[in-house]
Image: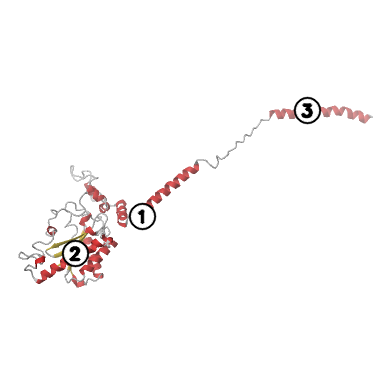
Amino acid sequence: MAEADKAAPAAPDEAAAAAEAAAAAAAAEAMRPIIRKIIVEDGHAGAHGGAWKIALADMMTAMMAFFLLMWLLGASNEDKRKSVADYFRPASHSQIVFGELAGSNGLFGGKSIIDTDGFPFTAKQTAMLERLTPQAQGGPAESFGSSKEENNKDGPSEQDPGKDSGSGSPGQGGGTGSPGQKQDKENFDKLEKEIKQKLSESKQFEKIKDQVSITRDKEGLRIEVIDKADFAMYGSGGSEMGAKAAALMTEVTKSLRPLPNKLAIRGHTDSTGFPPESMRNNWSLSTERADATRQFMQSQGISADRFSRIEGVADTNPKVPGNPADPRNRRVSITVLNQ
């Protein structure tokens, strides 16, 4: 009975403690911040954003440029590609010395930096030259040139082999020339006709047949292979014969092989010079090209004893005197000498 009396007062105390704990928990719950989590559905925005468009546009631009370049390379020939490459090749030197620019060569004595003579020498080997100097592709006018060789472009003259002041027309059998002169005239006529026929009938030489000039002078029959903006017999500044020039010289050599006449080869260059620090010049270059032509013809069956002289004249005898840098001034002359 006494123990029950002791436990009875304890019950209210436990209830009070539980009530206090519940009140404290309610107060703590009321003080806790409310956190709301909002989830937004992305849908397809993650896969279809704008970043991939930039990457795709860059790739498509690069592919378009690549295929355009491939198309241009396929549509152009080797000569045009070489001309473009030479034009965009970095030029280390100009035709005008820097000391001559901006009036430093005396009072108002300098040259303009945009003068055509100051263009890089590599650009003068390309088609850009044709735009700077619009002239006929076939060569200079009849009045151009002051040398005796240039005055005989129209064919036989009073100095022509096989024809003197008392000779008659070829078809009439007239003439008082020596037998050697008559034989030379017949050989030269046959040779000229044969070379022109080969060039006109072959599709390989369709674009370069106009670059072969055949004229008569007092020494004999002169055959010239003339460069132009997109055709060069030799590479720029070198003496290595190009493929088209080699094929052309092969046909010329075949026509020259049966003749007994001796040959003289002369190399010409334009006025474009070498860099100052180079040990070479146009004199050596023209001689090297003349000798390279001799070596090629000798390899094609021309005997060594038929070559009378090999010479280089640099740019001293230009084909286009009004423009020393014209590519047509670069040429190789093969003269079939009179017997």
Q: Residue at x 18, y 66 (%)?
A: 191
Instruction: Work out whether mark 2 precedes mark 3 in sequence or the reverse, and give the earlier one.
Output: 3
29 or 56, which lies in front? 56
Find disc 3 in the rendering and name its residue. 20
Closer to the eye: label 3 or 1? 1
Q: Give the residue furthest to the front.
A: 172
Q: Is residue 79 left or right of residue 186?
A: right
Q: Position of residue 10 (x, y in %)?
A: 86, 29
Give the number of marks. 3
Q: Is residue 287 visible?
A: no
Instruction: Work out whether mark 3 precedes mark 1 in sequence or the reverse, and give the earlier one.
Output: 3
Find disc 1 in the rendering and name its residue. 74
Q: Is residue 133 left or right of residue 174?
A: right
* Mark 3 to mark 1 CA distance (whole Å): 95 Å
Q: Is residue 75 visible?
A: yes
Provide the secondary structure element on which disc 2 rests. Answer: helix
Marks 2 and 3: CB-CB under 8 Å?
Answer: no
Amino acid marked by disc 1: Gly
Please identify the quarter of the rendering in which residue 301 is found: bottom left
| Mark 1 neighbour class, 10 Å CA radius: few under 14, some 14 to 19, many 20 or more | few
Amino acid marked by disc 2: Lys
| Mark 3 neighbour class, 10 Å CA radius: few under 14, some 14 to 19, many 20 or more | few
Q: Residue at x 90, y 29 (%)?
A: 6
Please identify the quarter of the rendering in which residue 213 is found: bottom left
Marks 3 and 1: CB-CB under 8 Å?
Answer: no
> In the rendered view, would you say 303 is above or below 10?
below
Find disc 2 in the rendering and name its residue. 193
Instruction: Work out whether mark 2 precedes mark 1 in sequence or the reverse, and give the earlier one.
Output: 1
